Image: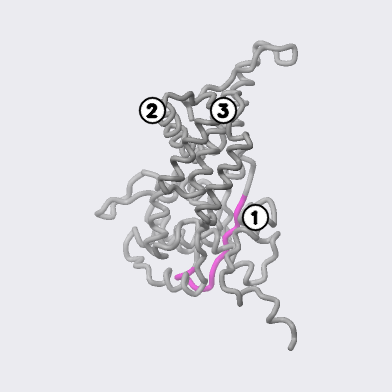
Amino acid sequence: MSTVPVVPISPTAQVPAHLVESTSRYVESGLRGAANTQRAYAGDWQRFTTWCQANQLASLPAPVEALAGFLTELADAGKKVATIQRHVAAIAKAHELAGLESPSADKKIKVLLKGIAREKKTRIKQAAAFTLVSFKRTIRAIDVTTPTGLRNRALLLLGFTGAFRRSELEALNIEDLAFDEEGLIISLTKSKTNQLGQAEEKAVFYSPDPQLCPIRSLQAWLRVLDRAEGCVFVSLRKNQQLTTRRMTTKYINLIAQQYLGSGYTAHSLRASFVTVSKLNGADDSKVMNQTKHKTSAMIRRYTRLDNVRQHNSAKELGL
């Protein structure tokens, strides 16, 4: 959202004049958030400003009536509740960056959003989770006689066993990988919940089945890549030639859907890690050590137990 002005920090007795510029930069960085969020918000903000211009309304600061009209139009156009809520968040962020009060805080907007959600009667769509049996079958069916197959097998296995977000898979570099006899340690320099770049690590372990082993699969792909540094997952040309282009999150999602099915996304790899782990008896702390979630509440949100027979204490009554 680079077009949104950020209010500068004025010189005060507490902030020496020569530090004002740096202070403003740090404040801006703290407000802006993740790169992917910035891109999504930028598009939403652009749609809102265009709508306001067409209706001769101010967008910054925006009156409550402008936001209400914009959200109503989105709802009437059939936009999902989650999409509408994201637009609200983008508009609120734009006002925050400019040091202005957001119309989204008004009670009228909150009532409007509640009414839109009630009429649409939609739940937040979550990425589906697959079963371990079906995932194993999918992995074994991948043709690994081509670089594309080797790359995609490594991508899916690493995404699942490492509980990766697709943005983390996109950003992964060879320098982040440390192999030893016990397995693989992957260092994350930054993630959605780790914007400050604090040290975070994920552990990946060997599987007794070479076809299903994330480490051996990744090593096979790295031999094809034949590089000592740079991005792990790159695009390939149609003739199977390697490029230096980092795979985008959009393409990673397409690969997941290609192999897992249209009902799944790349986020299904992460959701399925949580679900399979919980079904196998892992406690929340173990799951959180890999996913890097901060609370057990998020683990419960990620666990997909659509089958009422799964993880049900009724099986343990002793009758």
Q: Which residue is mark 1?
A: 298
Look at the image and tell me whether residue 182 can be seen.
no
**Front one among 41 and 146:** 41
Q: CA distance from mark 2 to mark 1?
A: 41 Å
- Camera-near label (2 vs 1) is 2
Q: Give the SS element for disc 1.
A: helix
Residue depicted at x 37% and y 61%: 258
Q: In this view, which residue lies farthest toward the bottom?
A: 319
First reached walking from the N terminus: tag 3 or tag 1: 3
Above or below, comparing residue 283 to residue 239 in the picture: below
**Front one among 33 and 136:** 33
Q: Within 10 angstroms of label 3, few (less than 14), some, or many (20 or more) residues?
A: many
Quarter of the figure that contains the C terminus: bottom right
**Front one among 60 and 249:** 60
Q: Which residue is mark 3?
A: 95
Q: Amino acid at mark 2?
A: Ala
* Magenta span of residues: 201-212
Q: Which residue is mark 2?
A: 54
